């Protein structure tokens, strides 16, 4: 799910669906029931995306354990010699 959610087409689809929903709501006079449905869908989508983001971050941390150790070390000076002076 995280691969599909991170694609630009997913963002375009969500913006398009919201625009269509708003246009239809304006034409219909903003029925209260439709507003409740829209708010429910937005809340469900937000909750789903929170879990997708957490899953993706956890997976990246599990697959790259050495990256954190390398990031914690100070960078080496490429011009410094390795032999003692």
Image (tube, helix red, strand yellow):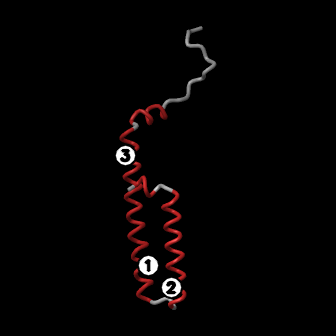
- Answer whether labels 2 and 3 touch (C-beta < 8 Å): no
Instruction: Examine the image and state in which quarter residue 62 appears.
Output: top left
For disc 3, the marked residue is 59
Q: State the CA–CA distance, disc 1 to disc 2.
A: 10 Å
Q: State the CA–CA distance, disc 3 to disc 1.
A: 31 Å
Which of the two discs, 3 and 1, labels the residue nearer the N terminus?
1
Q: What element carries label 1?
A: helix
Q: Nearer the viewer, mark 1 or mark 2?
A: 2
60 in relation to 5, above or below: above
Which of the two discs, 1 and 2, labels the residue nearer the N terminus?
2
- Answer whether labels 1 and 2 touch (C-beta < 8 Å): yes
For disc 2, the marked residue is 25
71 in relation to 10, above or below: above
User: Residue shown at 52%/77% (left/top)?
Assistant: 20
> Toward the viewer: 46 or 9?
9
User: Residue shown at 39%/76% (left/top)?
Assistant: 40
Q: Position of residue 63 (x, y in %)?
A: 37, 39
- Mark 3 crowd level (few <14, some 14–19, many ≥20, 10 Å Cα): few
Instruction: Examine the image and state in which quarter residue 61 appears.
Output: top left
Which of the two discs, 2 and 3, labels the residue nearer the N terminus?
2
Compared across the picture, whether 73 is left or right of 48 comes to: right
Q: Is mark 2 on a helix, strand or loop?
A: helix
Q: State the CA–CA distance, disc 2 to disc 3.
A: 40 Å
Q: What element carries label 3?
A: helix
For disc 1, the marked residue is 38
Q: Quadrant of the C terminus?
A: top right
- Mark 1 crowd level (few <14, some 14–19, many ≥20, 10 Å Cα): some
- Mark 2 crowd level (few <14, some 14–19, many ≥20, 10 Å Cα): some
Q: Where is residue 10 in the image (x, y as percent from the top left)?
A: 48, 61
């Amino acid at each position: 799910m995280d691969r599909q959610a991170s694609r630009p087409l997913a963002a375009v689809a969500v913006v398009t669906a919201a625009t269509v929903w708003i246009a239809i709501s304006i034409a219909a006079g903003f029925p209260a029931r439709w507003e409740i449905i829209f708010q429910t869908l937005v809340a469900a989508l937000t909750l789903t995306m929170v879990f997708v983001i957490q899953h993706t971050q956890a997976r990246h941390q599990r697959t790259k354990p050495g990256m954190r150790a390398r990031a914690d070390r100070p960078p080496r000076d490429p011009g410094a010699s390795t032999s003692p002076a």
